[in-house]
Image (tube, rainbow, N blue to C red):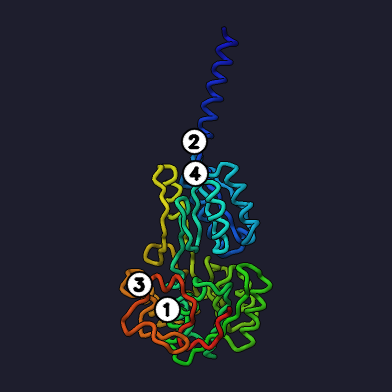
Amino acid sequence: MKLRSILVGAALALTAASGSLAEKTKVGFVYVGPVGDGGWTYEHDQARKAVVAAFGDKVETMYVESVPEGPDSERVMTDMALKGADLIFTTSFGYMDPTINVAAKFPNVKFEHATGYKMADNVSIYSARFYEGRAVQGHIAGHMTKSNIVGYIGSFPIPEVIRGINAAYIHAKDVNPDVQFKIIWAYTWFDPTKEADAAKVLIEQGADVVLQHTDSTAPQAAAQAAGNVITFGQASDMSEYGPKPRVSSIIDNWAPYYIARTQAVMDGTWASTSTWDGIGAGMVGIGEITSAVPADVKASAEALLARLRDGSYHAFTGPVNKQDGSAWLARGETADDGTLLGMGFYVQGIDSEMPN
């Protein structure tokens, strides 16, 4: 009888343990870069860690880093779904079609795609209004450039990146009518060698301010080596390069969103939604404006930041024309989200050609 009691007790314990494991919500993350990139992917992985911290043993997370945007990402997503993922975050624009394709094969799995526009019953989309942070950067850049040349390293010519260039230029031009933007397209999200080379070329062309929409800290290092060039952290604070060349940064804060969406899966309340939040909601943060920035410039940048945060000012407020001189926004008019989401044009004053 004693042996039977022990066996029954062991069986019950095993059943309870299995039940506990089965109750875990499995959350997957597909990353375009390495978790140590110091920028975009780093911040997404910080948010994954925040999910673990928030839910403890109620969740199990998995991730794959440095996944190319293309067929390989579809394989990674499929593998996560087959491993029992309840929720999968696909964290780069180029994962859009693969996400839709895999979601159709796994209707009971929830997908969250970052920065895209295609949705399905089990696919939500989310992004941040990075252009608000670019406006603050442009404001500082316009004040601080002595050569009146600001360099900009773009990743891919998609609306998200074009919006950022335009927002930075408008606000640099607003405080410095003589400012010029020189733009180099790296055609990569993360490639330290290409990013460093782009920064060096821009500096050789006279840029004493370099902005970036790529993910590594290589442009910061290139600027530091050049001397007398300022930069801004991208996606993450990159504060190790402060107080100069990095004088401030855009910080992506995905944690509250990831926690809320994981909770919704747990609660059974998850629904397909489109989220586009900015500084006001805390999804976009501005890193410390360092002592390398003059006090009056810092004060005016903080005033702009406050207006963006409380919604009293929109980063795209007319009068603004398109690059070809055609009218876009009349005085006091603000851009609608539809136009911003599909933005494929430069504003007037940028003399670079838009890539095909």
Helix, strand or loop under label 2: loop
Q: Where is residue 354 in the image (x, y as percent from the top left)?
A: 55, 81
- Front residue of this view, candidates 280 and 289: 280
| Residues under numbered marks 3 and 2 in contact, where contact means CB atoms less than 8 Å apart | no
Label 3 sits on residue: 306
Image quadrant containing the C terminus: bottom right
**Residue type, label 3:** Ala
Question: Cα distance, mark 2 to mark 1?
Answer: 50 Å
Crowd around label 1: few <14 · some 14–19 · many ≥20 (10 Å) = some
**Residue type, label 4:** Asn
**Image mark for residue 23:** 2
Crowd around label 3: few <14 · some 14–19 · many ≥20 (10 Å) = some
Question: Cα distance, mark 3 to mark 2?
Answer: 43 Å
- Sequence-wise, which precedes: disc 1 or disc 3? 1
- Front residue of this view, candidates 135 and 321: 321
Q: Which of marks 3 and 2 is in front?
A: 2
Label 4 sits on residue: 108
Q: Position of residue 349 (x, y in %)?
A: 47, 89
Q: Establish if 119 lies above or below 150.
A: above
**Image mark for residue 298:** 1
- Sequence-wise, which precedes: disc 4 or disc 3? 4
- Sequence-wise, which precedes: disc 3 or disc 2? 2
Residue, far top? 1
* Residue at (41, 60) in percent of width and height: 275
Question: Cα distance, mark 1 to mark 3?
Answer: 12 Å
Q: Nearer the viewer, mark 2 or mark 4?
A: 4
